[in-house]
Image: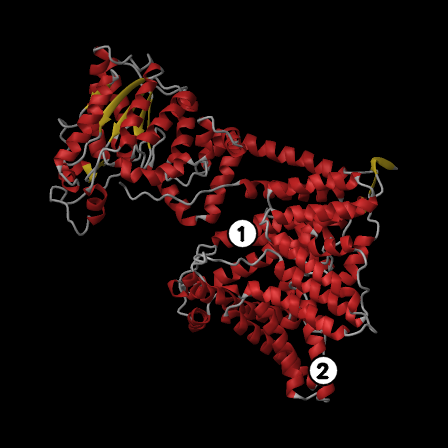
Amino acid sequence: MTIVSPAFFGFCALVLMLYYAFPTRLQNYLLLAASYAFYLTFSWKFPLLLLAMTGVNYALGPKLPKGRLHRRRWLVLGIVFDLAVLGFFKFAHFFVPSLIRLLSPLGLPVEGLKILLPVGLSFYSLQAIAYLVDVSRGQAAPSRNIVDFALAMAYFPKLVAGPIERFRSFIPALAAPRVVDNAVLTRSLTLLTVGLVRKVVVADTLLTAVPSKLFTNPGKFSSLELLIWSAAFIVGLYNDFAGYTEIVRGVSGFFGIELSRNFAFPLFSRNFTEFWNRWHITLSHWLRDYIYFPLSRALVRRNPGRFNLANLTLPPILTMLASGLWHGTGWNFMIWGFLMGLVMVAEQIPSLWRPVVSPDRRPAWRRYLATAALLVGGLLAVVIFKASAPTALVFWKRLLTWPGGAFPDSRVFLVMIPAFWIDWVQYRRKDEFAFLSWPPLARAALLAVAALSVFLFGRAQVSEPFIYQGF
Amino acid sequence: MKTPFHKPTLQLSRPLGRVLILAALLLMVMAGLAEVLARLDAVQARLPAPSLGSGHQNLDLKVARLERFIKKEGGVDCILLGSSTVNYGLDPEAIRRAYRNRTGKEIRCFNFGLAGLNTPMASAMTRILVDRFHPKLVILGIFPGEESFGRAAGQHIMSNPWVNQQLDRRSFNGWLLEHSMAYRYFLRFCIWLKQPDFSRSTRRLEHQTAPDGFTRTTKAMANIDDPPDPVRERELFIRYGHFQIAPSHLAAIDELLGFKSRVDLAVVEMPIHPTTMAFFGRGRADYDQAIAETRKRVLQHGVSFWSAAEIKIPKEGWWNRNHLNVTGAQIFSVWLEDRMAEAVSRGLLQEPGLVP
């Protein structure tokens, strides 16, 4: 069941009706059952895995607070378990062919064996690791309520693709009574509407327009086409993920459960450090809190001093390598992570000699130039994210040697206008609910236009052309 | 003030939903206004033809043109149905002139030739055309060999929600396409936005296609009398080389001819250049067998079958080996009108025209 589908919204409506009717003490049971039912629609095997991970992490929680015997061993065991599960499924395509070669002579039915990455595993495994670490650090209490804990792991709006919630705040929120009043309803509806516009009108249109061979056969395209379509891809990708997050946050709001914000106008960033604090925020903060900071602290303890090369380079590079690995298992993701890490090292270097000046306090021309530079950098980086390493080299070479070429027919970019406009309105007020400050008639008009656009773009089925050559 | 929706979790209070109600009203006004505008002749004259989203090169155009034709003419008397051979090969205006000259009456003819249309699809389209547009006469132009090619076109046509809606396979999208002109214009906008190349080629086709559905081309094939080149025309040798009469073609002929009780029918063999026979594996024998088999079925149903064997199209009348250009279409259309007149005089067809 995909998030943007009539089936999903019908499912939510049904669960909501029951939810509001249920007494507070039973609502979490309902949500838990609904979450597993939702997960079952993907595969009957996935909930089994989730159940197993829930059980293991829940059981380990009470063994981790300070003063418990062998707590470090239990922590390591828990992290290794969670990473092993994630790694097994993520790296399955590496070892499955060897497994098939090994087992098929034994007459076992392994031909065509495939191990699918369970939907959402990359997200809830990180949540589980964060829970174990937080408990061991004393930043969270071990959960004593299996239903609340299981719900925190499985909660269906965030199950598929986050946000990556921290259980130290999420579980208490689940345990507390929830209220959905006019303000919560309005904000949830706003998130849902904006999310649908981003996903259905902007992202789906842009991403289907991007040529399918752009990142597999860049030699077919001129430099200008590579540039323009890469930009379209980035905007499409951003609106796709941001739209999805806003939709699930909106849906969750109807249950009175607030999910974390994941995007804060990243395309207005002035450097990559700022960018990674605005793009997929919950992942960035997870990486910061569970890899970057611990690594930095450990290195500083070992090598005190500002100008130590290892202190400067290892935390950002290893953190971004981990990010690359989380996103995918190909070498291109590792290269992407490494390059991102290098960029972040480079951004830190000026701060070694002079005080850090916030980008907000710089002159406007420098801010705009910085944003433009960031967008160019992002464009180059997305290539290695999407293409294999050799293909990325071809792409970059073609782009940077600039034989030019004709401007592609990019009328589809018209849909980027509402996307940028939404971001601009929110960015100016530094408030994702900026539209709620508009007069009621303006809000109503905007809502009507948004609803009509989502309906039309979502409904419009235009088949692939059948071009007849005359026979 | 509390509302009835005041539970432990849901604590809504008045005023509630003001903006939502206002938005709903505005939405209805916007949708209504768009629908009114989309139906105005002045607006339609300035816009490209609306789309059914089929992806088929001229299905959307022909349906839109036929609807406008009927609105302007008050109805349609005769529909010319078939593949691109009909699309380029039969000129309703030429038929109209010839008919007027002979009878003094008017006949409202529309060319509904669709690229790649094969007989099974033609049968489905006949049902749709008869149910929806009520012509008095449907003339089906056939060219053996369409069956193998027609599957791709058929998928586009038969998967289209509007087509399915007409065939009682209803859906919300089909309902929208049937009832909302604004939605169809939106689909055209989507094509313009997302498929610029297809949009451009569709626009070129619109310019080439007359209000009566006839698509005119003035191109003429040089050296058409020369035998086909197995290298340059290799694809056609492959397509027709293993030609066999498809059972689906014969079954569809039977099904189509079953509409005889509801509309006058006639079947015409579309002209092809004699050199086309070289593409068929057994040459003329394959082609003649297909025509003979089809003719037999048609005559068994008591429907007229008009063979193009006797007609002579000059070499400047051919766009390519099996498509006429505007010159050839003129000749063939006049010939067809003559066949129609003969059928009417023999009582095989009712007089399709109107007194002006």
Amino acid on which disc 1 is placed: Leu
Secondary element at image label 2: helix
Left or right: residue B186 versus residue B208 is: right
- Amino acid type for the residue under numbered disc 2: Ala
Residue placed most toward the observer, B194 or B276: B276
For label 1, count other residues whose C-alpha is less than 10 Å away and answer few (under 14), some (14-19) or many (20+).
Answer: few
Give the chain letter at badge 1: A
Q: Residue A225's spot in the image, x, y percent?
A: 44, 62
| Label number found at residue A298 | 2
Q: Is residue A269 left or right of residue B297?
A: right
Please identify, in this view, whether the residue under mark 1 or under mark 2 is nearer the observer.
2
Q: Residue at the spot x=35%, y=39% of the render?
A: B153
Q: At 88% across and 37% down in the image, what residue appears? A: B1
Q: Work out whether residue A359 can be spotted.
A: no
Residue drawn at (49%, 58%) of the image = A114
Extreme left residue here? Answer: B226
Q: Secondary structure at mark 1?
A: helix
Residue at horizontal 71%, vertical 77%?
A: A294
Q: What is the chain identity of the residue bearing mark 2?
A: A
> Residue A414: which disc?
1
Q: Confirm whether residue A89 shows in the render.
A: yes
Front-lying residue, B107 or A316: A316
Residue at the right extreme of this rendering: B1
Q: Position of residue A455 (x, y in %)?
A: 59, 40
Residue A239 is marked as none
Circle nearer the N terminus (1, 2): 2
